[in-house]
Image (cartoon, helix red, strand yellow):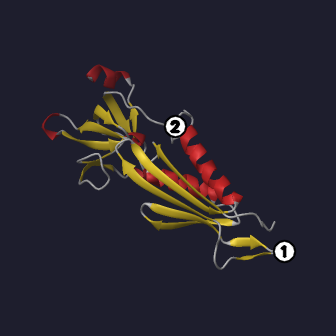
Amino acid sequence: MLYLGPKRSDHWEAVVFAPPREVFAIAEQVMALPPFSFRVVDDHTAEVVQDLANGFFGQWSKVRYPKNRIRIECQPIPAGTMVTVAAQGDRSATIRATNLLRILGRGERDRSTVYRFRAIPPGPCTVVQSWAGTGYPIFSEPDHSAARGRAVRPASPLLALEQRGRWVRVRAGQGDDSGEGWIEADQLVPDETPSRRAAS
């Protein structure tokens, strides 16, 4: 339906546990329903834009200069991800933006989602199942821009040492072959098998 109300401009900031890739995945799933579409701008920014409009006679047509636009910016910080959402246009843009923030906020307390805050206690842990058997690289610092070291797989023995926000410092390997580094908490699960508990 053609909207003739006033244009709005809203802005929100929130710190969430989900990493940027998950924020953008959620945004695409819940916000990019027709007549909106999802566009990646760069590694830290994406937009949801209304590129179809319902005309006066009910027909749908491409929008040359979209007026409804939601811009999502994600910056990793020690506590998680700083998400900045700016919505411009009519009420439909505002509703989509607030839905994204609501899902991200509630997801941290929902044990059935992967977006929840994951506390990894000190002790044995394992990497979640990797895609096609690929390993997960251990970072030298709790930052995606840090140097990457050895890759670990689900069968690799790991020992969680401490957690700092979304990152966990782990010791990989045993004896002289061991090394320490950082892995994202959402890539780890505590290992509760009796043999690993006894070893710790």
Q: Secondary structure at mark 1?
A: loop
Q: Is residue 49 left or right of residue 140?
A: right
Q: Secondary structure at mark 2?
A: loop
Furthest residue in direction right, as rendered: 57
Residue 139, horizontal then vertical, whole percent: 27, 48
Furthest residue in direction front, as rendered: 6
Mark 2 surroundings within 10 Å by alpha-carbon count, few (fewer than 14), some (14 through 19), many (20 or more): some
Q: Nearer the viewer, mark 1 or mark 2?
A: 1
Q: Which mark is residue 108?
A: 2
Disc 1 marks which residue? 56
Quadrant where the C terminus is found in the figure: top left
Residue lying at 60% horizontally and 44% vertically, measured from the top left: 102
112 up-or-down from 129: above or below: above
Q: CA distance from mark 1 to mark 2?
A: 42 Å
Q: Nearer the viewer, residue 150 or 88?
A: 88
Mark 1 surroundings within 10 Å by alpha-carbon count, few (fewer than 14), some (14 through 19), many (20 or more): few
Circle 2: residue type: Glu
Residue 181, horizontal then vertical, whole percent: 24, 43
Circle 1: residue type: Phe
Q: Count numbered badges in the picture.
A: 2
104 up-or-down from 8: above or below: above
Residue 91, horizontal then vertical, whole percent: 70, 58
